[in-house]
Image: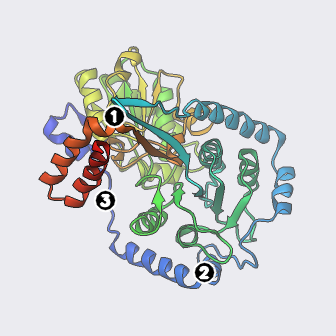
Amino acid sequence: MNVIRYPQRAQWKGIVARPQLDVSQLNATVASVLADVRQRGDDAVREYEEKFDHVRLQSLKVSEEEIEQAESMVSADLTAAIRLAHYNIKKFHEAQRFSGEKIETGPGIVCWQKSVAIEKVGLYIPGGTAPLFSTVLMLATPAKIAGCKDIVLCTPPDAQGHVNPAILVAAKTAGVNRIFKAGGVQAIGAMAYGTETVPKVYKIFGPGNQYVMAAKQQVSLHEVAIDMPAGPSEVCVIADEKANAVFVAADLLSQAEHGTDSQVLLITTSESILEAVQTEVERQLERLPRKEIAAKTLENSQLVLVKDEQEAIDLSNCYAPEHLILQTEDYADLAERVVNAGSVFLGKYACESAGDYASGTNHTLPTHGYATAYSGVNLDSYCRKVTFQHLTEEGVRHIGHAVELMAEAEQLDAHKNAMTVRLQSLEK
């Protein structure tokens, strides 16, 4: 890992920079696949499944029998863990329900909002080397709470054409049964455009590799909404002299094993902690099955020594991390100064893994600095706010002349007239 001691603020831009990739060829490839899926539907999806996932599929739809069989293939302990996580996620997201209040903005004028669920949503669940069944719970649970009528889930099958059984158990636990065997760009295209088998949706959620992210961004320009722009996963840990170096190293490595394009950042006020974490990272790294992936990630990562906690939180806010862990004595005070972060973990026992799986918060979060402007997935992500207003005669009299003056000043005479005819009708 790269060590930086007492950097000047002018150096911060370089510290917080994410690795940049040349995506010009990638975007062209993604655009080509999307266009093919749009034109040829199921046939194109099946061909790309054979090309990229090395499986020849007769049907894209996961059958009820396959979902039932999956339950017998997942251990009782893991099933219980999935149900515990689902309970906590459900409890946390149910507390986010919106209650619109009717507001009288003036005499005879009442305005309010109503939360309305997005009717059709698509969930993308990566399969690959780490089938993310936990993401099924994170995406499907709030969708069900919101009241989305159509919840479509796409995930890549293995070479035998089977979906990971834990993904199917999580889907059933969260109440989703429209599941399709499709991964990568072709899955995003299928949900964006619709095929003979996969329904078109209005908004697509879920993580994925750089091809999936590029596909989501491309379809969002014309066809559907997406949850958020995102890049590789990341964590920032702020640690003081009393932090537990074993815990800090474990947190950094838990993020580093996600993928070689992930990034980890330690900001500390203690030279001794910096050195202890370095030693502990090397020790724990040797025992990881995904050692090569984590080691590659660490090459893009930083250990930064700063003069005090205010500088530490300022640097973190500049970085705007997806995950922020505050392993300091005064974490509660420091938390009040967090401005930019996806999800924050307070104290030495709140590891990122807790939020990734079972504490109840959502793990689908903004990365690549997007936490400066985006929230993580929450109940509102699955809803729209529709506004209403009602005017009585008194309301027309109260704001009518102001509306006329403003419309006239903007040279929108038809706008002015819509109010004028109402004012005139009240004079009769």
Secondary structure type for disc 1: helix
Return the disc, 3 or 2, that comes first in the chain's sequence.
3
Under mark 1, the amino acid is Glu
Return the disc, 2 or 1, that comes first in the chain's sequence.
2
Q: Which residue is mark 1?
A: 394
Inter-mark Cα distance, 1 to 3: 59 Å
Q: Residue at x 15, y 47 (%)?
A: 405
Q: Position of residue 420 (x, y in %)?
A: 25, 51
Q: Nearer the viewer, mark 2 or mark 1?
A: 1
Secondary structure type for disc 2: loop
Residues marked 3 and 2 touching at CB (< 8 Å) = no
**Quadrant where the C terminus lies?**
top left
Q: Nearer the viewer, mark 1 or mark 3?
A: 1
Image height of 283 relative to 312, above or below: below
Secondary structure type for disc 3: loop
The image quarter in which residue 243 lies = top left
- For label 3, the crowd category at 10 Å Cα-Cα, with few meaning under 14, some 14 to 19 and many 20 or more, is few
